[in-house]
Amino acid sequence: MGVSELDLLLYVIGICVFLMPIALVSSDKRVSGQEKNAWLLATVLLSWLGWLVFVSTVKPQKIKTETKIVKLRKKKR
């Protein structure tokens, strides 16, 4: 018994659905370095749940830079 075209199509779609959160985390610019590696590991192990936690916990880049500016201003005083 061989693999039908429908089975092959479903396998490819399943693999794409599994790999999509990994691609989304790896292409995100909000984290870098070891933090990104940790999120990639969590996403590989937890798939979509890891990606949902990533999206809900990582701050947007704008807020991080504003926080750094406020910290620098406090140090100068």
Image (cartoon, rainbow, N blue to C red):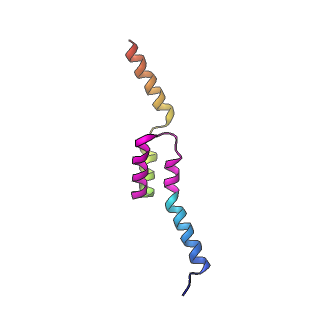
Image quadrant in which you'd find residue 5 = bottom right
Quadrant into which the N terminus falls: bottom right
The residue at 48%/28% (across/down) is 65
Residue 34 as seen in the image, left or right of residue 15: left
In the image, residue 35 lies in the stretch drawn in magenta: yes
Principal SS element in the magenta part? helix
Q: Which residues are drawn in magenta?
A: 20-45
28 versus 22 height, above or below: above
The residue at 44%/44% (across/down) is 36
Residue at the farthest right position: 5
The residue at 45%/38% (across/down) is 59
Q: Position of residue 32 (x, y in %)?
A: 46, 40
Residue at the farthest top position: 77
Quadrant into which the C terminus falls: top left
Q: Nearer the viewer, residue 1 or 63?
A: 1
Q: Position of residue 60 (x, y in %)?
A: 49, 37
